[in-house]
Image (cartoon, grey):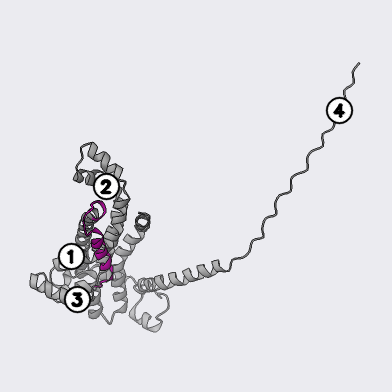
Amino acid sequence: MSATTAVAVEPRPPEPQPARPARVFDWGQPFVYLVALVVAAIAVGPVLYVFVGGFRTTIDLNANPAGLPDPWVFDNWAAVLTAPRFWGNVAASIILAAATTAGVVVAGLMAAFVIARYDFRGRRGLYTLFAAGLMFPLTVAALPLTLLLRTLGLHGTYLGVIIPGIAFALPTTIIILVPFLRAIPDELEEAARIDGATRIGFFWRILLPLSKPGLVTVGILAFVASWNGYLLPLLVISTGSLPQEWWPLPLGVTQFSSQYSQNTGAVLAYTSLAMIPALVFFLLAEKRIVGGLTGAVKG
């Protein structure tokens, strides 16, 4: 008869866990958030003040400039929206912004394609020339540009605003698009050639769809810049023969504020309506702009 001996197995003690380092409070994080909050308040505060001020009467604004509407008045907005001049200014801004954006995208894409994908003497110098255009402000060219437009017969016309607007937006456009086009592998172009595609076919079928984020970015920037542009229309249109009803919105705001200087609430309402389209358009396309600029930096 055999006996079985039971052996008790003692459980292993749990292994000691490494001590977690104590969290050290980083005083730099609250400071960063505080600075960001102050900057945001400085940037957004005036916009909110103008928007809310459009719901106040002139008497209320003079009595308490920093207060809230008491009561809320909608007559200022109704007066602006029912004025034919406002809608004429909106139509003029749409024409100028759309034409300038189309010209910037088309001309910038063609120039960037040549600089990025062709190898020729002086390519780097040409790219540097466009980069130097970023440091050339419109104020420096105001007098010679006005004289040139008068000579060409474009002074006082929309073309006199659109063509220089395209020229001044090209440096930024090319700086953004060239890295996008350079980042496209050469193997794709070689494969397209093997399949019988020409350079133009490669441009339309492969390169153009792949560079869509950059095109959207430069298009948005060009549209917003043209919509908010003031100095160029002031030099070209305000001294021409176009009626004030067909001036763009930045000039319309100035003219409206001069004519209705006693009605501060209406002026603030007009200013708010003038900047709302560009502001909404920019906010809706913010992610595309950031993505396009990020792709340009990576390229």
Q: How crowded is mark 2: few (under 14 residues within 10 Å), some or many (20 or more)?
A: some
Q: Say which residue label 3 marks.
A: 142
**Badge nearest the viewer, 2 or 3:** 2
Q: What residue type is labelled 3?
A: Ala
- Per the image, the residue denoted by label 4 is 6
Q: What is the CA distance from the residue labelled 1 to the residue labelled 4?
A: 97 Å
Q: Quadrant of residue 78?
A: bottom left
Q: Which of marks 2 and 3 is nearer the N terminus?
A: 3
**SS type, badge 4:** loop
Residue displayed at 64% across by 61% down: 23
Q: Where is residue 8 in the image (x, y as percent from the top left)?
A: 84, 32
Residue range in magenta is: 115-137
Foreground of the two, 30 or 113: 113
Tell me the residue that label 2 is attached to: 207
Q: Where is residue 155 in the image (x, y as percent from the top left)?
A: 12, 72
Q: Which of 20 and 83 is in front in this view?
A: 20
Q: Is 19 situated above or below 257?
A: above
Determine the secondary structure under disc 2.
helix
User: Within 10 Å of the Cα at label 3, are there few (<14), some (14-19), or many (20+) other Cα atoms?
Assistant: some
Quadrant the C terminus occupies = bottom left
